[in-house]
Amino acid sequence: MVIQNNLLKPQRGRTISLATNPDVSATPLLNLAVKKMKDFNRDLKDEPFLLLYPDGTEVANIPGTQTPFSLSAYKAEVGKSYQRITLFLCSTRDFEEAGKLSDLSDSDPEMIIRQSSDFDLADTLPMEPIDESSPVQKVAETENGVGDIVLADEVQQVMDVDNLVSGLPGNNPGTSQCPTFQSSCYRDYTDLFEPIIIEDDDEIEHFTEDKNHDLPPAEYVEKDVQPHDIIAELAMDIDHKKVSRFNICRSDVWDGAVRGFQRSTYSDNNDMFIKFNDDAGFLEEGLDTGGPRREFLTLLMAVLRNRPIFDGPTESRYIVCNSRAAREDEYFLAGKMIAVSIVHGGPAPHFLSKNLVNYLIGNPSFSATIEDVKDEEIGKVLKEVLEAESDESLLNVILQNSGMFQTAGCFRGVKASEKKAFIEEYLRWYILDRNHSAIQRFKDGLGSLGFFAALQKHPSVLSPVLCFSAKALTASDLETMFKPVLSPVGSNRQQKEGKTIVFWADYLLDCEEKTTALSLEEVLMFSTGLAAIPPAGMMPSPHLEFLSDSPFPLANTCANTLKLPLLDSYTAFRANMDFGIQNAPGFGCY
């Protein structure tokens, strides 16, 4: 930083974030920060540095106390999450020069803080004149710390100093101690190389309970990341002031979806406006504030599962080459549809093969079985290979089907003890290698709205949302999800509503036990436009209301509201719920 007319500004553009153990002390944290800063900024001079608080005082003690600094103690003191803890690097030379300038000044201390749109005053700490946070260390000690560095967004801030400070209480002449300011002022500091942002979640305290410190910090952080947090960040790029329009016929969702995605005015970053046609063929009236969009994306994921670009078991689909789909760029479109559905609050596919997802993110893990092959002739040959009991019989099977194995590049003599590895080699080619170009195009589509980049960054968090999950909806899930809106306590209506809530709980149990005409997924679909809980979470939160003017249930999918009829008997309630939902527009399309 250059001092011009008493104007000091931190350098920008090199902000990094630092993931480390919460018990780290000042010196190891300084060493980690300096090392990473030098790794990312080769023009950084090789000289001693100090770690500073946002008020410009050196990090050694907790501010206002004589307690030695530790990250967890500082977090507890300032009451911020780890992501919002900001510290600064400053060379010892510039720090001491700032102290000399303050000694030469005979004016009163004055600090003007100019605030950009991204600057949060909560990220600065005022100094109290009672205790200094720490003395200045001229040479940083060398200790080995643990930690990992990841890139973070830049924290923008501009600090102007009109008059440098001298003669303040607690500032002894002749020392290089940092001056202490009144709480209304802030310490000036020069040549601040970028904030060091401690990146982690509030739950990082749990790491101290885990004694296995052999795990790298990146794995610690991964445990605290949830899909809805990642998706919420991706969704920030959606412009809700612009819309892309889709006109959809429930009997042919794919046709309308392709036209909508290929329209010249379509943009992934626009909000989606969906209009369905009704049973009479007319477009349904009403403004799409979320419900029709969720229903459309649910129906689209169900249709996508059965497109000819996929093969394999229903719950573990992999991509296969299809010449017509390749000409129409359907692989890219399919990837885009999945990314858009997830980021726009719709469902995840939950049908992709784990082997396919691993291949996409560069994970070499592969585990397939002959049942993954739907071609009957190929499956029959592979079973013969697997059932061969001798080297001779195995060789005969391979020779009889030489063309099949030559195409895969694995035609050779194999011993009976190697037949499982031989089959796995063929399956890897059949499922992945031969379809590489199509998979690559599908991956390009997944890059929409930054989803694939997030998948690569958080594979253990986002991979499960693409693959099949054996966990099904339960009656307890829906009962907990839908919060009732009740009339005043003691009123006659409130008593009827309480009775209806009991009917609702029993009805959900009957759906779970498959003793009604409906499934829990169909009840959720009727109420919210979703047949499963989406990775982005349920927004807005679902709730129950009650009807006295209709014997059948009603739903507002935009508000995630289910309205239950107030009836006298459970038999009537159950029958009317079945009838009302089964006769709703679009029932049976999912």
Image (cartoon, helix red, strand yellow):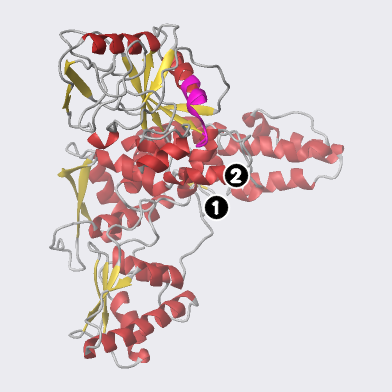
Disc 2 on helix, strand or loop? loop
Disc 1 on helix, strand or loop? loop
Q: On the image, numbered disc 1 is attached to which residue?
A: 313
Q: Name the image quarter holding residue 419.
A: top right
Tell me the quadrant of the picture where the N terminus can be found. Answer: top left
Q: Which residues are magenta?
A: 21-31
Between residues 390 and 106, which one lies in front from this camera angle?
Answer: 106
Q: On the image, numbered disc 2 is attached to which residue?
A: 210
Tell me the quadrant of the picture where the C terminus can be found. Answer: bottom left
What percent of the width, then of the height, locates residue 141? 53, 17
Between residues 401 and 64, which one lies in front from this camera angle?
Answer: 64
Q: Rate crowding at label 1 as few (under 14), some (14 to 19) or many (20 or more) other CA atoms within 10 Å.
A: some
In the displayed structure, 538 sits above or below 462; it is below
Q: Is residue 328 visible?
A: no
Pointer 2 or 1: first along the chain: 2
Q: Name the image quarter holding residue 159.
A: top left
In the displayed structure, 513 sits above or below 326; it is below
Amino acid carrying mark 2 in the image: Asp
**243 with respect to 392 (left or right):** left
What percent of the width, then of the height, locates residue 508? 42, 77
Q: Give yes or no for residue 28 being in the magenta stretch.
A: yes
Task: Name which residue lies at 29% across and 14% down.
Answer: 190
Q: Is residue 358 visible?
A: yes
